[in-house]
Image (tube, helix red, strand yellow):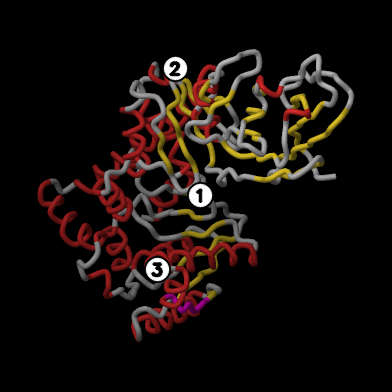
Amino acid sequence: MLNKVADFIGKHQLLSHDGLHLVALSGGADSVALLLILRRLGYRIEAAHCNFHLRGEESDRDEDFVKSLCKKLEIPLHVIHFDTEEYASIHQVSIEMAARDLRYGYFRQLCQDLGAASVCVAHHRDDAVETLLMNLLRGSGIHGLTGIRPKNGLIVRPLLCVSREEIEDYLHSIGQDYVTDSTNLVDDVVRNKIRLRVLPLLSEINPKAAENIFKTSRYLFEAERIINQSIDNQKVRLIQGNPDSFLQTVSIPQLLRLPSPEIFLYEWLAPYGFNTTQTEQISSQLTGESGREFLTSTHTLVIDRETLILMPLQPPMKTIKIPEEGRYRYNEEFFFDIRLTNDISISKSDDCVTLDAATVRFPLTVRPVQTGDRFCPFGMEGHRLVSDFLTDCKRSLIDKRRQLLVTDRDGQIIWVVGLRSDNRFRVTEKTLEIMRLTISKGVNS
């Protein structure tokens, strides 16, 4: 047993003999075995126990047991008490999630206070198999089928190489007792049902069922590493725009040339809240009608012709009134400047438009595009739908929604901001005064 665990620790570089390591000690067989094995292997350890006060006298019994054990072994022990039910109620989470949050938050703080290198938890091979089966029942992808990792940040799991039966046999061989959590003996939750019903049945079919499932999870873990490297390379090649930027795009023709577009979509979009059902729907619509949109609580993805566009959800576009000449804030980023001048010079900048001041009547309105908006593009005599004009300018659906217009007192569009002024307000040979409209970024000054 000692050699098996020592080899596993060495293979995955989990612990060092010159550092301090905390052992999460519940008093159950797994954590007691972990404490004793690491002590026998010569690691410098201290124990940490959480009393969640969820099982009445049994919770206090567990605390008394670990105190007695650590005193006997002369191992420093840190104990903390939690009102888990109150935490769960305040944070609107399950009791199980509340206990997990409290436990690992305490461990992280304790590591920081003591200068400990890691927290050793007693997950073993059967725990990893149970987790894999639970994820399989949920319809998990490959990430959920790799089981429990030997190391995850500060958390290390030196006993993943051994089974629950081996742990209990080891404790019996050295005459060490432990406590039993009675809730683990009732098949009222999924994990307990798998532990008490499914795994024994699988063992009847094949005595090495749990061992073989664990081996499969290790194979999938190695396969996952290859897949992750491939996906990372594909992201660099396909995604235009930084992952932290305002907007990202992916070419659909390039995406369809990948071995598995759907896997790429899931890996790209999952961090932004898109689930497997959504990525399946997106994948099925890649060659379909342009304009389809998919939403999460934080992001939107639009299929725009041959491009996927991903961007954070933006606050609604607003409308502001401009009563007279001056500088006006539209939002935290943009300002509008309206100046009247006798300098009859035409701006050629996209951010500035020059109009015949005599034809424009205040107040002006800055607002987003609305369905049915029409104007006379500069250089033309007839009217056009703004939506058709934006399509001709190859603006994406997202750009169209965020396109601003400036209208006059009568609601006539005088400027499709950044793109084109209205021909009816153009500067002519008879113009005596110019209205210069500018959109700019910067602080209001």
For the record, the magenta segment spans 79-84
Q: Position of residue 51 (x, y in %)?
A: 44, 77
Q: CA distance from mark 3 to mark 2?
A: 54 Å
Q: Residue at x 45, y 28 (%)?
A: 231
The residue indicated by pointer 3 is 32
Tell me the crowding category of disc 2: few under 14, some 14 to 19, or many 20 or more residues within 10 angstroms, Cα based: few
- Most foreground residue, 326 or 187: 326
User: Are discs 3 and 1 less than 8 Å apart at CB?
Assistant: no
Instruction: Say whether residue 233 is visible.
Output: no
The residue indicated by pointer 1 is 14
Disc 3 residue type? Val
Q: CA distance from mark 3 to mark 1?
A: 19 Å
Q: Nearer the viewer, mark 3 or mark 2?
A: 2
Residue furthest out toward the bottom: 57
The residue indicated by pointer 2 is 254
Q: Residue at x 72, y 43 (%)?
A: 322
Figure label count: 3
Instruction: Say whether residue 372 is visible.
Output: yes
What is the quadrant of residue 170 in the picture? bottom left
Residue furthest out toward the right: 343
Is 81 in the magenta? yes
The circle on residue 261 is none
What is the quadrant of residue 122 in the picture? bottom left
